[in-house]
Image (cartoon, rainbow, N blue to C red):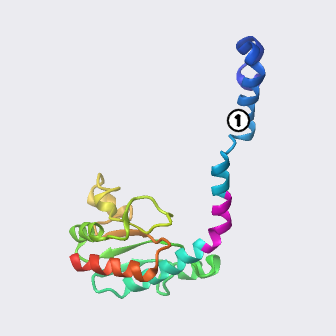
Amino acid sequence: MAAYHGLVFFETFGDLALTVHGHAVGLRDLGPAMAPMNAFLAITGAETLPLRMQRHCENAETIANYLQNHPKVAWVSYAGLEGNKYHPLAEKYLSGKAGSVFTFGVKGGYEAGMKLVEACELFSHLANIGDTRSLILHPASTTHRQLTAEQAEAAGAGADVIRVSIGLETAADLVRDLEQAFEAV
């Protein structure tokens, strides 16, 4: 068979040729089959995605507005906020729903950023995004710590940057968690 560099399945695999051929060609041409539970979870996830995204976006807007007015926050970069330079694009392409991942700058720089993240109790201190749980990260002290200050700044991970991925929790609980974390800074 040309796709397998001239391999003749019967010569190579004998009595198992049909099984190996079906498995190899099936995987290559069709991809692997999902386990039944995985298929169920994927279908359930797809069916509930619009509802979950609505909650993500509503919560993110609430948190971004809270942060924008907080005295210990220097700036908020969230396209859902009216003053953001990308707000018109969010309105045009995303029906005003700017997603649930954004960044903000904490006053006090590097040390304040680390303290804020460490003081959060409801937010999980994780680098992944798009979870059902709210996540918070200080990139300068974690994912981008190997960079120089100039490189981190150029990458959007300056000393004051905090990245959040807002989940499905109650927005008021998220605000309370941030408020108690800010008190620790």
Relative height, residue 86 to residue 125 (above, below): below
**Residue at 71% in and 15% down:** 13
**Residue 112 position in % (x across, y down):** 23, 71
Tell me the quarter of the image containing the N terminus.
Answer: top right
In the image: residue 172, left or right of residue 35: left
**Residue at 52% in and 78% down:** 86
- Residue 185 seen in this snapshot: no
Within the magenta stretch, is there residue 70?
Answer: no
**Residue 124 falls in image quadrant:** bottom left
The residue closer to the viewer here, 129 or 105, is: 129
**Residue 165 falls in image quadrant:** bottom left
**Residue 126 position in % (x across, y down):** 38, 60
In the image: residue 62, left or right of residue 97: left
* Label 1 sits on residue: 27
In the image: residue 93, left or right of residue 174: right
- Residue 106 seen in this snapshot: yes
Q: Taken as a whole, is the magenta stretch helix, strand or loop?
A: helix
Please state the extent of the stretch shown in magenta in the rendering: 43-51
**Mark 1 residue type:** Leu
**Residue 40 position in % (x across, y down):** 67, 55
Relative height, residue 111 to residue 43 (above, below): below
Q: Residues within 10 Å of mark 1 (few under 14, many from 20)?
A: few
**Residue at 46% in and 83% down:** 62
The residue closer to the viewer here, 16 or 71, is: 16
